[in-house]
């Protein structure tokens, strides 16, 4: 269980006016859930992820993972970045095995486990390739396999499909849904696409900017159907999907003054 | 761990869907023919100029004269040594200087990139001397260290050290922060972060620094030998010039050009071997 309690993150700005990237945010992420944070740019969703990853210090509040307070980056939280961060000098297999290597897992064992993960993301034939010979979508798949390799407690995904074309993106969403169904990982997923949020989330957290806050939470269950059928069409034309999409859209586009306080 | 799933229903990516490999290579090979023609043209022009006496042999010796002189200098020697002696003397100096540049410059540069204190302490003296033309402080080095090999090797080491040190420092600072964050979230320790991320990431910059160092070293080398030496290609050229033996001057220049070309090709080969991924991701 990941617990975020009253977390604020403030950045000093050049004009002296501090930027409140996160303002007293509280959120729980239960095991086996996919929490998707959605919102316009600047709403603090990436800041939230970076805070959980331990990449930046909190101004206020605490984040705990299974009771342990988060103070620095660590192997218990796997991160998939928007821009892939694979090592160009290592082949795909060694990239996936990197976290296991850091743990001192023997070469044979880490390669075996990495091959298994490459199979899971459909890249078994590409193990020996350098990452720069892969397409953007394939590189993100390697990134997902790499983050899963060390069996982290939670997977943090920062707009991982944002830079992909819409067709590849759909394939990747399908991949993620099937990986989630098979592994039961808890996932925090950041996106600015409402459709993506509804397709993938078991909980959708809507955030608003200046200061970054959570304005609403919704439960959804489309991802289970999606993982089973692999077909996005019927899900997105579901009545409940369309209603929720409309509701979230109006929340995001609401003029700032009209918003009520945090619902959470 | 619930990852123990057997081959999945998820469709594997097809092997043929891959970006075509390196279009750059074909571009670089296509200029090879053009360059060869240019070189041949220049040599032909030299032949013609000598053949029709466009310039006095004192200023421009004929290719045949230079060739004759080449074998003479190679066999009998000129200015206290054969051509091989002079070449080895020069190469020995530059090798020593590059050794110092690499074994002192790389570690110090890496430390300067990693640590504020090391950078604060060393950057001022390095910046100060690097701005000086090496030949300006050569007399001072000769006063301090004498006319022998030491002063020349120190001079050359100073000129190869700075570019390598700067490059290693820049290499450390050029590591993308996302790459570091990714390694940390995979559980890397500080030592692992350095060896598996920082060092390889800095390698392209370090090799670029090495190229600059070789260039700086070669030009300083010949200049230093012109002024104060008893051996070396620069010394041979200067001695020949004193006797207006232009053909020997040409022999020296050709050897230096070949050496410079060999260094450049060697560095290109090294880059190809060590960092084939440069600029790819």
Image (cartoon, coloured by chain):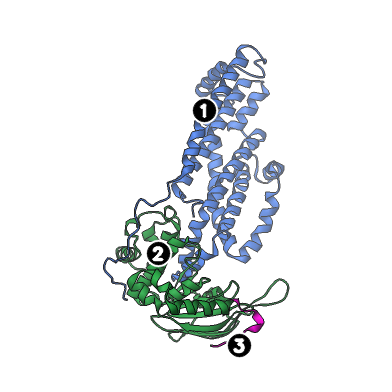
Chain colours: A green, B blue
Residue A254 part of the magenta segment: yes
- In percent of width and height, residue B92 lies at 53, 39
Label 1 sits on a secondary structure element that is: helix
Residue linked to disc 1: B36
2 or 1: mark nearer the eye: 2
Q: Is residue A176 visible?
A: no
Disc 3 is attached to a residue of which chain? A
> Which residue is found at the position 64% from the left and 19% from the top?
B60
- In percent of width and height, residue A86 lies at 45, 61
Crowding near the residue tagged with mark 2, few <14, some 14–19, many ≥20 C-alpha atoms within 10 Å: some
- What's drawn in magenta, residue-wise? A253-263
Crowding near the residue tagged with mark 3, few <14, some 14–19, many ≥20 C-alpha atoms within 10 Å: few
Q: Which mark is residue A171?
A: 2
Disc 1 is attached to a residue of which chain? B
- In percent of width and height, residue B162 lies at 62, 50
Left or right: where does residue B9 sit relative to residue A233?
A: left
The image shows a total of numbered marks equal to 3
Question: How would you classify the magenta stretch by its main secondary structure?
Answer: loop
Residue linked to disc 3: A261
């Amino acid at each position: 269980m990941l617990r975020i309690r009253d977390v604020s993150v403030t950045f000093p700005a050049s004009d002296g006016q501090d930027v409140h990237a996160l303002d007293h945010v509280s959120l729980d992420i239960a095991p086996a859930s996919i929490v998707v944070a959605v919102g316009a740019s600047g709403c603090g969703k990436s800041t939230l992820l970076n805070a959980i990853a331990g990449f930046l210090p909190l101004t206020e509040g605490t984040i705990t993972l299974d009771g342990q307070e988060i103070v620095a980056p660590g192997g218990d939280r796997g991160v998939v970045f928007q821009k892939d961060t694979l090592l160009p000098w290592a082949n795909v297999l060694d990239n996936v095995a990197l976290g296991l290597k850091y743990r001192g897992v023997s070469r044979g064992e880490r390669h075996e486990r990495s091959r298994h993960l490459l199979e899971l993301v459909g890249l078994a034939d590409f193990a020996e390739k350098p990452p720069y010979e892969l397409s953007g979508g394939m590189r993100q798949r390697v990134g997902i396999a790499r983050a899963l390799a060390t069996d982290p407690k939670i997977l943090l995904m920062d707009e991982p499909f944002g830079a992909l074309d819409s067709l590849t993106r759909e394939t990747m969403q399908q991949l993620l849904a099937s990986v989630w169904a098979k592994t039961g990982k808890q996932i925090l997923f950041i996106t600015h696409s409402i459709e993506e949020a509804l397709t993938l989330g078991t909980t959708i957290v809507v955030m608003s900017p200046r200061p970054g806050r959570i304005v609403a939470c919704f439960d959804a269950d489309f991802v289970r159907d999606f993982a089973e059928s692999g077909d996005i069409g019927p899900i997105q034309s579901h009545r409940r999907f369309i209603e929720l999409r409309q509701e979230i859209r109006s929340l995001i586009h609401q003029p700032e003054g009209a918003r009520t306080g945090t619902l959470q | 761990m619930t990852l123990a799933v057997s081959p999945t229903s998820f469709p594997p990516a097809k092997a043929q869907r891959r970006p075509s490999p390196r279009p750059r290579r074909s571009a670089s090979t296509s200029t090879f023919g053009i360059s060869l023609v240019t070189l041949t043209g220049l040599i032909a022009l030299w032949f013609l100029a000598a053949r029709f006496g466009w310039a006095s042999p004192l200023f421009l010796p004929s290719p045949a004269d230079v060739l004759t002189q080449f074998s003479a200098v190679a066999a009998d020697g000129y200015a206290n040594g054969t051509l091989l002696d002079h070449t080895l003397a020069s190469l020995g100096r530059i090798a020593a200087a590059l050794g110092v540049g690499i074994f002192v410059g790389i570690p110090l540069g890496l430390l300067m990139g990693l640590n504020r204190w090391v950078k604060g302490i060393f950057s001022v003296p390095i910046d100060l001397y690097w701005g000086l033309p090496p030949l300006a402080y050569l007399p001072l080095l000769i006063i301090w260290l004498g006319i022998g090999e030491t002063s020349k090797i120190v001079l050359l080491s100073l000129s190869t050290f700075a570019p390598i040190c700067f490059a290693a420092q820049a290499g450390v600072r050029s590591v993308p922060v996302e790459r570091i964050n990714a390694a940390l979230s995979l559980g890397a320790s500080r030592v692992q972060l350095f060896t598996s991320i920082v060092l390889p990431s800095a390698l392209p910059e370090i090799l670029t620094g090495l190229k600059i160092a070789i260039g700086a070293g070669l030009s300083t080398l010949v200049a230093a030998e012109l002024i104060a030496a008893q051996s070396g290609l620069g010394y041979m050229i200067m001695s020949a010039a004193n006797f207006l033996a232009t053909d020997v001057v040409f022999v020296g220049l050709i050897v230096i050009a070949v050496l410079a070309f060999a260094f450049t090709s060697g560095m290109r080969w090294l880059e190809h071997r060590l960092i084939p991924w440069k600029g790819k991701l």
